[in-house]
């Protein structure tokens, strides 16, 4: 009766809004059993909607057998995309909290994640790091494409999935740590499905959509934007193990992809399209998230590829998306759009804190704060209580402003502000100017201590030519310096320029600014600027 009631409640609307994962899975299995939910981009393997209830059943019994009680946390470090999907949905559906882990990370990083998240059990397709005191369960990947739990030859009865028996689960994550100490974040399934429903509605997903996700599945973006929003909409998602530039558009055409989940680094790579590459006509949009999309990259992609870019803004604490540009209507370059089923405000900073733009004009920016049913109300790790106001607003750590139409423009992080002799400047303003130089592929601007001025901006640049000749290198550096001198006001001009092989970024595409000083970078040339 529960299942029949759920079917009546959700089947008329392809983008339903359940708050129970098992209820959604059961409805999709009834209405779309033979249709693909998830597909492996590198093979013909797929996972149908009708396979999902059995996957949840099997994982529930496996976890019971492993002694993981309902409500406990379970780490998942699985390489194969489809095996990850069954484990991710299965653990949540079994009333546990899944903690996705990057299985390719160094042993020390995996051990730190397990300790930070206090995991008693990890299901993994790799060997355990040494010294961990927990139940590390190695998985066999022999059952390719099967929704069986892939743990050593277990068989389970095929009884019906009872929606009343399974407790509520969720996702346990750690923030990226790019701007400070990582924080532990718990996202229950009601919050996750609320956000997935908002994304599916905003992006106008339907059963005919086929998404493409080359982003890591252990990050919130791929989990909610890729997997859960597709499940809510009843659409399909094609999963790649990583971004492959070679043969990209051929793959998109062969799989009849209608939207692409990406980050700015991927969009930058795709902007360099060769004349022989043909962009399929069926792609509705490419979605940009995880980091600011430079204006120069947006322009290059639009000229070269022509697919609409949907710039968005999100964070782990909001289960990914907070704002997005509209599919229908005005999409403003440089803006991350308007709030999508979330409350957002700009909280004023100290009246004395006016931030200069690149041209030296003073502008009023504020602290971006959010709240709503898709936003956490507290962290699961102590010491961050001051991030929440008494009325529930979460201080994101980002700075920005809203224009007259309510579009959000981000200018940077609070801790990225460079105070040059009392003038406060933002790295992004400087980076946008440097990226306009044709020879520049990537750039990061950070603060350096200065005895006289307190701080000065310093630019780290990656050139488009990987191994430039000495004269090319000198020419590029001269052009960058000249462009900065003409375009930027004196406080915003970099005091030094470093040409490097690569910038340190995380697996989610975010720049690790602190690592530019903490880790060695391969430098090709350096110069002090006037």
Image: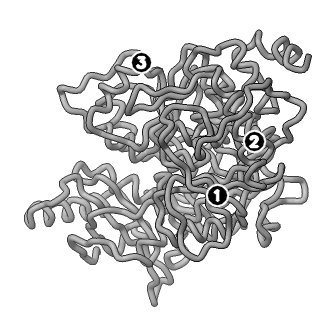
- Residue depicted at 88% across the width and 35% down the height: 165
The quadrant of the rendering that contains the C terminus is bottom left
Residue 61, which numbered label? 2
Q: Which tag, 2 or 1, sits closer to the chain's start?
A: 2
**Residue 523, image quadrant:** bottom left
Q: Is disc 2 placed on a helix, strand or loop?
A: helix
Q: Is residue 404 visible?
A: no
- Badge 2 density bin: few <14, some 14–19, many ≥20, Cα 10 Å: some
**Residue designated by label 3:** 256
- Residue depicted at 60% across the width and 71% down the height: 112
Residue 187 in percent (x, y) is at 75, 48
Residue nearer the viewer, 295 or 96: 96
Residue nearer the viewer, 144 or 83: 144
The CA span between labels 2 and 3 is 37 Å
The quadrant of the rendering that contains the N terminus is top right
Residue 521 in percent (x, y) is at 32, 72
Residue nearer the viewer, 461 or 366: 461
Q: Nearer the viewer, mark 2 or mark 1?
A: 2
**Residue designated by label 1:** 122
């Amino acid at each position: 009766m529960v299942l029949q009631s759920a079917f009546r409640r959700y089947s008329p609307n392809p983008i339903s809004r359940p708050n129970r994962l098992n209820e959604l899975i059961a409805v999709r299995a009834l209405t779309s059993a033979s249709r693909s939910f998830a597909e492996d981009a590198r093979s013909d393997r797929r996972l149908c909607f009708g396979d999902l209830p059995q996957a949840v059943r099997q994982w529930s019994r496996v976890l019971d057998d492993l002694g993981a009680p309902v409500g406990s946390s379970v780490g998942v470090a699985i390489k194969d995309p489809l095996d990850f999907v069954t484990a991710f949905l299965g653990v949540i559906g079994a009333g546990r909290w899944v903690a996705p882990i990057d299985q390719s990370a160094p042993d020390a990083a995996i051990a730190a994640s397990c300790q930070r998240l206090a995991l008693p059990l990890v299901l993994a397709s790799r060997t355990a790091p040494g010294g961990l005191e927990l139940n590390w369960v190695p998985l066999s990947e022999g059952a390719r494409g099967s929704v069986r739990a892939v743990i050593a030859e277990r068989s389970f009865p095929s009884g019906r999935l009872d929606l009343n028996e399974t407790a509520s689960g969720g996702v346990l994550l750690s923030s990226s740590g790019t701007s400070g100490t990582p924080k532990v974040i718990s996202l229950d399934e009601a919050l996750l499905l609320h956000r997935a429903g908002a994304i599916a509605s905003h992006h106008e997903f339907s059963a005919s959509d086929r998404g493409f996700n080359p982003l890591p599945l252990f990050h919130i973006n791929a989990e909610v934007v890729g997997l859960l929003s597709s499940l809510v909409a009843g659409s399909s998602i094609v999963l790649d193990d990583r971004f492959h530039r070679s043969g990209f558009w051929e793959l998109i055409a062969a799989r009849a992809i209608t939207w692409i989940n990406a980050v700015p680094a991927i969009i930058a790579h795709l902007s360099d399209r060769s004349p022989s590459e043909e962009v399929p006509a069926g792609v509705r949009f490419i979605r940009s998230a995880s980091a600011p999309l430079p204006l120069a990259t947006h322009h290059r992609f639009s000229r070269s590829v022509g697919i609409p870019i949907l710039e968005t803004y999100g964070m782990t604490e909001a289960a990914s998306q907070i704002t997005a540009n509209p599919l229908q209507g005005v999409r403003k370059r440089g803006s991350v759009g308007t709030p999508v089923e979330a409350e957002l405000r700009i909280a004023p900073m100290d009246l004395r804190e006016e931030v200069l733009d690149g041209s030296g004009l003073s502008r009023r920016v504020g602290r971006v704060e959010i709240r709503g049913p898709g936003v956490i109300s507290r962290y699961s790790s102590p010491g961050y209580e001051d991030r929440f106001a008494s009325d529930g607003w979460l201080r994101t750590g980002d700075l920005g402003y809203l224009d007259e139409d309510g579009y959000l423009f981000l200018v940077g992080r609070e801790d990225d502000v460079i105070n040059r002799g009392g003038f406060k400047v933002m790295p992004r303003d400087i980076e946008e100017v440097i990226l306009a130089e044709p020879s520049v592929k990537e750039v990061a601007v950070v603060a350096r201590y200065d005895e006289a001025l307190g701080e000065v901006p310093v630019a780290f640049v990656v050139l488009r030519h990987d191994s430039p000749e000495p004269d090319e290198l000198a020419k590029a550096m001269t052009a960058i310096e000249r462009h900065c001198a003409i375009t930027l006001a004196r406080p915003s001009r970099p005091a030094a320029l470093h040409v490097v092989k690569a910038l340190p970024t995380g697996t989610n595409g975010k720049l690790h600014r602190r690592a530019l000083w903490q880790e060695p970078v391969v430098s090709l040339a350096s110069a002090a600027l006037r």
